[in-house]
Image (spheres, helix red, strand yellow):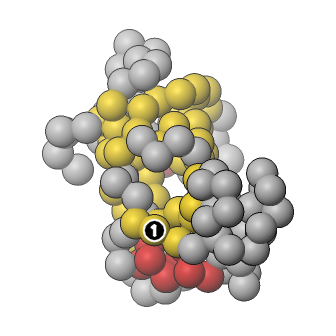
């Protein structure tokens, strides 16, 4: 898919996030763990947000989590006109950190979006360089 045909905003990797986006392109979800205090965190950083250590290697996450919170947006915004309503979700990863994402593979209604429901990561290929992690109900087809 080309950047011209993908209408939603496309993330721009920074030095802190480049590794994350490179792994997403391979359809893998990677996060960081501090070697000094064992704190697992997301979003990507050069230093641990807990103890400020710079020994924060990456590891491959399970891609599993639960729906921690969400809101359903019904108003069309540029790039999302064809997707309303859509859920802006906070997913708590099995490893502990939370990340914002979208829920796909199910109608985004309160009846279908049950807090604590199991989720698994899927990737939307936005361009040849960027794949965006999203989450679907665990065990459902894409």
Q: Residue at x 46, y 19 (%)?
A: 115
Residue 35 rendering spot, x and y as whole percentages: 61, 65
Q: Which residue is mark 1?
A: 59
Label 1 packing within 10 angstroms: few (<14), some (14-19), many (20+): few
Q: Is residue 116 left or right of residue 32?
A: left
Residue 12 appears in the picture as rendered: no
Residue 135 visible in the picture: yes
Element at label 1 = strand
Single out the residue that lies furthest toward the front: 36
Q: Is residue 95 shown left or right of residue 77?
A: left
Question: In the displayed image of the protein, which residue is found farthest to the top?
Answer: 111
Going 58% across and 45% down the picture, which residue do you hit? 97
> Which image quadrant for residue 25?
bottom left
In percent of width and height, residue 66 lies at 42, 32
Q: Which image quarter is the N terminus in?
A: bottom left
Residue 32 screen position, x and y as percent:
57, 64
In this picture, residue 117 sits left or right of residue 56:
left
Q: Measuring 45% from the left and 59% from the top, which residue is drawn there? A: 133
């Amino acid at each position: 898919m080309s950047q011209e045909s993908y209408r939603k905003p496309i993330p721009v990797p920074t030095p802190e996030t480049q590794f994350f986006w490179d792994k997403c392109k391979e359809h893998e979800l990677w996060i960081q763990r501090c070697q000094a205090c064992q704190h697992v965190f997301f979003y990507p950083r050069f230093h641990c947000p807990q103890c400020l250590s710079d020994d924060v290697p990456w590891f491959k996450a399970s891609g599993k989590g639960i729906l921690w919170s969400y809101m359903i947006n019904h108003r069309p915004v540029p790039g999302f006109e064809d997707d309303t309503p859509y859920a802006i979700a906070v997913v708590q990863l099995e490893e502990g950190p939370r990340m914002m994402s979208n829920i796909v593979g199910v109608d985004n209604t309160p009846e279908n979006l049950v807090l604590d429901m199991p989720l698994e990561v899927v990737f939307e290929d936005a361009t040849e360089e960027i794949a965006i992690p999203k989450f679907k109900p665990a065990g459902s087809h894409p």
